[in-house]
Amino acid sequence: MEEHPIVAKHISCSDISIIESISNYDIEERNTTYLLTLKVTNSNISVLQTSMFRRFTKLSKLYWDSNIQNILPGTFSYLDNLKELCLQGNQLTSISDGLFNSLGSLEKLDLSNNRIQNISDHAFVGIKLNELDISNNNISHIGQELLDSLNTLTTLDFSYNDLNKVNSFKNLPLRSLNLSHNRISVVDFEVFHENVYEINLSFNSISEITNLNVSRAYEIILHHNNIQHFEGNVNVTYLDLRYNKLETIGTSLFGSGLKRFYAADNSISVINPNAFFGLYDLEHLLLANNNLSSISNSLFKDLRSLTYLDLSGNKLTYFAFGTFDNLVNLHVLNISYNNLKDLQQYTFHSLGHLADLFFQNNEINGVNVSDLMLYMPKLKTVNLDNNDWSCKKLVGIVLNLKNMKVSFPNGDTWEESNIHGIKCHETLDRAPADNGAKSDSDYSKLKHFFNEDFTDTLMYKYFNEEFKNSNFFQILRKSN
């Protein structure tokens, strides 16, 4: 029986001799009929030649990540079985018509980290891509015809380019669209397919968004933009508006399906008491680093599913009774970096599931650990650093926390009075150093008054002279 030679199905550049010194001749003349995966790195080849892969007819995955400046027409002929092509990290500047049209089985194309400025409108005609990555290039425009040809695409990454306008993606059945780190200033959400799962528009210059309510996306990421307001009835599950310019949060802005809302690092000073009305499924709420000085005690009344609440970095001075009453599933509460003078642990009486409480960097000078644990029996971690602690009180608090197996991080103040690095001030009672001298001085003044000054007073003169001639004095004298 004839024996067939064993042929490796996966060859990487570390397995074959064509590493570093690979040439077009090496590629074209090697017997690689059964090869399924080829990886080439650190190659000196700058131009991929026509039909250079004619001996790679079974190839399924091709990775080539260095020095390519140009790809000639017909380069990928014969690669009928290629499903994944990665050309990231090269020096390509443009993608011409028909370059990939022979790759009828191609599903994933990676052109990231090149120097691409232009992609022809017909560059992807003839292929049925599922995933396309063109991130980290210099593209300033996407042709509408180009987008319409990608009608099988589910994942598109166009991040880190120079786009300043968003064309229509309606014909693309996308699940994930990444347009972050561009120069986009205006977004109309009608240009996106209504069933796209994730839209990432972070790190742009967006100041205006319209028709956000038509999107059915699960996740919309808009952090690090210039957004000052947005329209109501947003039907998303995850909305990230951190690092924008929001000043208020009004009513009827959110659909009932919202689960995570991130609005930290804005300029929010006012939140309508009914802003979160009906958000029974909301789980995470981030309002950190804003300008809030007060919170309505009805603001969180519908948030029974909330597990994470961050109010740190505001100007809050107190919480009214009832503020946290309905947060029965809250696990993490961060109220650090505010102006709180009293922890007001009685306002936490409904937080029976709370595990982590952060109230560092306030002006709090006392806390009853026993009461705290009575209301929050599942408490595991607190951070109490940088408050107005007296060392005497802080010692007691720390001992009680340890006894109740509640952990706390050490502070970083070791050169001043501290307990475990947590800064505190000493309040020892000390008698004044000049107390004896002061007593002698007071006695001398009193003695001088009765020996000299008192004889000139009306009281002395009355009782010493006039009182003796009074009828009352005569009666007293006779009674004796």
Image (tube, rainbow, N blue to C red):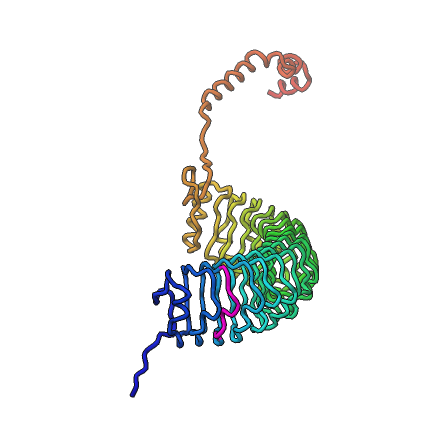
Give the residue furthest to the bottom.
1
Q: Is residue 301 above or below residue 4?
A: above
Q: Is residue 474 above or below residue 376?
A: above
Q: Is residue 363 above or below residue 197?
A: above
Q: In the rendered view of the protein, which quadrant contains the N terminus?
A: bottom left
Q: How many marks?
A: 0
Q: Would residue 214 appear left or right of 130 to someone viewing this image?
A: right
Q: Is residue 69 above or below residue 465?
A: below
Q: Position of residue 89 (x, y in %)?
A: 47, 59
478 or 75: which is nearer to us?
A: 75
61 or 347: which is nearer to us?
A: 61
Q: In the rendered view of the protein, which quadrant contains the C terminus?
A: top right
210 or 95: which is nearer to us?
A: 95
Where on the picture, by quarter, is residue 127? bottom right
Q: Residue at x 54, y 13 (%)?
A: 448
29 or 390: which is nearer to us?
A: 29
User: Does residue 176 appear in the picture of this structure?
Assistant: yes
Where on the picture, by quarter, is residue 230? bottom right
Q: Position of residue 326 (x, y in %)?
A: 60, 61
Does residue 224 belong to the magenta stretch? no
Q: Position of residue 233 (x, y in %)?
A: 69, 63
Where on the picture, by quarter, is residue 174? bottom right
User: Does residue 273 appear in the picture of this structure?
Assistant: no
Decide whether the magenta segment is chiefly helix, strand or loop. loop
The boundaries of the magenta stretch are 69-79
Q: Position of residue 49 (x, y in %)?
A: 47, 66
Q: Residue at x 48, y 61 (%)?
A: 88
